[in-house]
Amino acid sequence: MAQTWAEELRSRGFRVTPQRRLILDAVRDLDHATPDAIREHTGQGIDLSTIYRTLDALERSGLVTHTHLGQGTAYHLAEHADHLHLVCRGCGAVSDIPLSVASSMVAELRDSHAFDADARHLTVFGRCRECSTDQ
Amino acid sequence: MAQTWAEELRSRGFRVTPQRRLILDAVRDLDHATPDAIREHTGQGIDLSTIYRTLDALERSGLVTHTHLGQGTAYHLAEHADHLHLVCRGCGAVSDIPLSVASSMVAELRDSHAFDADARHLTVFGRCRECSTDQ
DNA sequence: ATCGATGCAAAGTTTTTGCAATGCT
DNA sequence: AGCATTGCAAAAACTTTGCATCGAT
């Protein structure tokens, strides 16, 4: 059970390597994992090109997902991608909120625009309370 | 009236130059203007660094806005930014739809999360009808 | 005459690619 | 053994910066 992910990878024809373990661990540990943060978290041993290629493989296997935050691409475990992102343009803070806030929009997109939206990748820009009052 | 934008720029301390005219025209003409597309549209004469600096100035003057689409940054006239973007992960198509589909989400973010969302910058990833059926 | 804006060249960032060596299966 | 994966090096793509010159005000 603890290594379903390995089976998942193998069943898709991907191999399970130490690097992939470490990268997946890093994605699990970090909050919004960027390729570079993953490299640091794993302790410099893994080449960035491997990280990019691995994230691509993990994503195509359905184990992780990514979003475009303000500056850069952030990865999550797919099973933890149960939220969407708010990015404050004032202070840069990123917060996670339940997907449910988007549900009516998702429903309307499906019904009126025949578009199957993936709210897990949604990033909403705006201003948090502190930064709204500051102007 | 036709050149309120020039007054707008000047009132903010920016100067009005031929390049800025051309770049603003390009943003108006192109659908989702990227810096490089703007350079092509204006006919190669303007340096890319000027385009980046100008877009920054135009944005800080409130004349244009930008969004992060799948690959790259797209600019719009602020007055035409009355829509949000759907990006299909299957075929890459970008469509514009009315901001109203996001209004209940925006209201909930304001009421329950004290977050002032800017739906004009919203990009929703997912699949269009054709690409959903294709799998 | 000022001081911001431009073009050019160079550098910074982030992501991708080629290829020989390595190691999972 | 076979072939995907890795590391390294190089390249590609995108964006920013420094600086001398030019030009809007």
Image (cartoon, coloured by chain):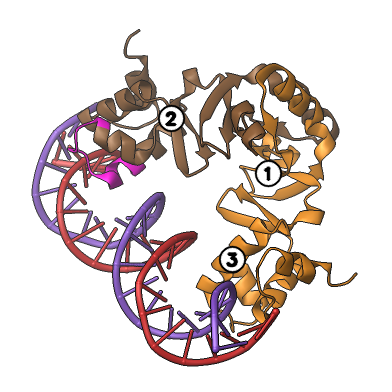
Chain colours: A brown, B orange, C purple, D red
How many angstroms separate mark 2 from mark 1 (CA)? 21 Å
From the viewer's perspective, is A80 left or right of D11?
right
Please name the residue that numbered disc 2 is placed on: A32
Q: Secondary structure at mark 1?
A: helix
Nearest the viewer among C18 and A53 is A53
Boundaries of the magenta span: A41-53
Report the residue at 46% width, 40% height from top.
A73
Residue positioned most to the right:
B1
Q: Position of residue D5 (x, y in %)?
A: 26, 38
Nearest the viewer among A94 and C21 is A94
- Indicate the chain on which mark 1 is placed: B
How many angstroms separate mark 3 from mark 1 (CA)? 17 Å
Q: Position of residue B96 (x, y in %)?
A: 77, 47
Q: Amino acid at mark 1?
A: His
In the displayed structure, A97 sits above or below A35; it is above
Q: Earlier in the sequence, mark 3 or mark 1?
A: 3
How many angstroms separate mark 2 from mark 3 (CA)? 28 Å
Tell me whether circle 2 and circle 3 mark residues in contact (CB < 8 Å).
Answer: no
Tell me whether circle 3 and circle 1 mark residues in contact (CB < 8 Å).
Answer: no
Disc 3 crowd, CA 10 A, few/some/many (<14, 14-19, 20+): many
From the viewer's perspective, is A90 left or right of D3?
right
Q: Position of residue B122 (x, y in %)?
A: 68, 40
Q: Quadrant of the N terminus of chain B?
A: bottom right
Q: Secondary structure at mark 3?
A: helix
Nearest the viewer among D12 and A8 is D12
Please name the residue that numbered disc 1 is placed on: B121
